Image (cartoon, helix red, strand yellow):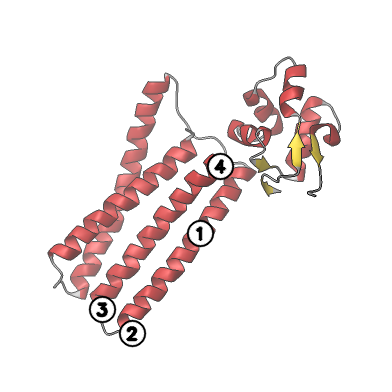
Amino acid sequence: MTFKEMNAAVMLLGAVVISAWVLTGAIGDPTLTLSAVATRLCWAILASIVFNIAAIIVFTILISIAQGREFRDEVADERDRLVGAKAMRNAYVVASLAGLAALIVWALGYEVTTGVYVLFGGLMLAGAVDAGSQLVYYRIG
Amino acid sequence: MGKGQPGITNTIRVLRFHAGEMTQAALAEKVGVTRQTIVAIEQGRYSPSLEVAFRIAAAFGVPITEVFSWQAAD
């Protein structure tokens, strides 16, 4: 496993963990105001950043110990940029669909907060698709 | 070029052998790409840009046609 693959795996893990946390909160207290939901999602974004940084540090240390040498990132080359672009393209499709889904939810007359959750969930899914696509493209070309 | 193309083959493994069993890491350093990219090219999972293809040929001191060949699909 390369550093970039590990980074993608951590991003994927982070998206799953944070999404699960937000979903649990949404189900546990569905009567929150828009302001409260927005605040919760801001905390979720902050938690996502902290989780990713901490997980990368921890996994880098663990893999370095397991391999017996420093596990570090390499300078990106043309293949890395191509993999990143293709993964981003997939994520863009999912993010666009998330935007559309949120609009449909509001158009159908659901609560504003429901649409916000749909939008946030869709964007987290887009992040997961980006990371998952990178893993697939690095493995199968 | 992008994802590996079915009609493109390469002789990098043979050329590395004739170059004193040059490692993939050494070739990667000479070409200026990561070792994983050399692995992917060698296995036909990735077709490099024209520039990288020329760099690989230059690393072995051979013409590009001796490294890569292309056969049209029937």
Q: Where is residue B69 in the image (x, y as percent from the top left)?
A: 81, 38
What type is the residue that disc 3 sits on? Val
Circle 1/circle 2 CB separation < 8 Å: no
- Same chain for labels 1 and 2? Say yes or no: yes
Residue A51 higher or lower than A63, as above or below: below
What type is the residue that disc 4 sits on? Ile
Residue at position x 13%, y 66% in the image: A29
Label 3, label 4: how many angstroms apart (C-alpha)? 41 Å
Q: Residue furthest top?
A: B20
Q: In which quarter of the image is residue A28?
A: bottom left
Residue at position x 75%, y 37% in the image: B9
What type is the residue that disc 2 sits on? Ala
Q: In which quarter of the image is residue B24?
A: top right
Q: Name the residue under label 3.
A: A112
Q: Name the residue under label 1.
A: A90
SS for callout 3: helix
Residue at position x 15%, y 71% in the image: A32
Q: Where is residue A138 in the image (x, y as percent from the top left)?
A: 54, 42
Point out the tag, 3 or 2, that comes first from the N-terminus. 2
Point out the tag, 4 or 1, that comes first from the N-terminus. 1
Q: Which of marks 4 and 1 is in front?
A: 4
Q: Nearer the viewer, residue A12 or A54?
A: A12
Point out the tag, 1 or 2, that comes first from the N-terminus. 1
Q: Residues within 10 Å of mark 1 (few under 14, many from 20)?
A: some
Circle 3/circle 2 CB separation < 8 Å: no
User: Relative to A93, is A125 on the left or the right?
Assistant: left
Tag of residue A107: 2
What type is the residue that disc 1 sits on? Asn
Q: Position of residue B4 (x, y in %)?
A: 67, 44
SS for callout 1: helix
